[in-house]
Image (cartoon, grey):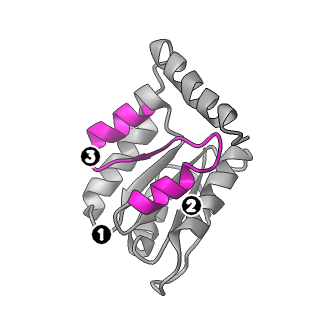
């Protein structure tokens, strides 16, 4: 499995701890930046990760900013991305099971490292349940198409 990960300055430190965590699970990591705590704009990294996912260069992505809010909004602007901002392992599991979230968004200033790792693990270990949820994902795709997002 290949995961793209990106963060702004507010998520940099958490990103740096998640990379070895992912590698410890035999996951190849594509680091889309940023590479320091110097102030940068989160949309740059949200788009970079989202494009790696929709273009098939990564199987999924993780985006991190201070709260996870802005970077999740930005990632969701890329058609085909279903970025879910989570703050607990239960939310991460449901994001995959019900929404087939292909990008996980985290708050670097909100979550302790252990909680963030538990969220990532829960998301990676969960499986999309399909069936009734497919209808809803199809409606999301229709919104993208109807508003000329593709």
Q: Position of residue 20 (x, y in %)?
A: 46, 63
Q: Real-space Cα distance between discs 1 and 2?
A: 17 Å
Q: Quadrant of residue 30?
A: bottom right
- Crowd rating for badge 2 (residues with CA inside 10 Å; few <14, some 14–19, many 20+): many
Instruction: Point out the tag, 3 or 2, that comes first from the N-terminus.
Output: 2
- Crowd rating for badge 3 (residues with CA inside 10 Å; few <14, some 14–19, many 20+): some
Secondary structure state at the residue bearing disc 3: loop
The correct choice, above or below, for 1 with respect to 112 in the image is above
Marks 3 and 1 close (CB-CB < 8 Å) = no
Quadrant where the N terminus lies? Answer: top right
Residue highlighted by disc 3: 88
Q: Which residues are magenta?
A: 69-96
Q: On residue 46, which mark appears?
A: 2
33 or 138, nearer to the observer: 138
Secondary structure state at the residue bearing disc 1: loop
Magenta includes 88?
yes
70 or 129, nearer to the observer: 70
């Amino acid at each position: 499995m290949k995961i793209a990960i990106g963060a702004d300055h507010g998520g940099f430190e958490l990103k740096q701890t998640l990379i070895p965590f992912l590698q410890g699970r035999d996951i190849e990591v594509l680091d889309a930046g940023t590479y320091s705590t110097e102030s940068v704009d989160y949309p740059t990294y949200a788009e970079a990760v989202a494009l790696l996912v929709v273009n098939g260069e990564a199987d999924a992505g993780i985006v991190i900013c201070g709260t996870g809010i802005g970077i999740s909004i930005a990632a969701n602007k890329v058609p085909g991305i279903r970025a879910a901002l989570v703050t607990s392992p239960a939310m991460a599991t449901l994001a995959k099971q019900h929404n087939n979230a292909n990008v996980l968004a985290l708050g670097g200033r909100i979550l302790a490292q252990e909680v963030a790792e538990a969220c990532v693990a829960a998301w990676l270990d969960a499986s999309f349940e399909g069936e009734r949820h497919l209808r809803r994902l199809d409606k999301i795709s229709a919104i993208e198409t109807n508003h000329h997002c593709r």
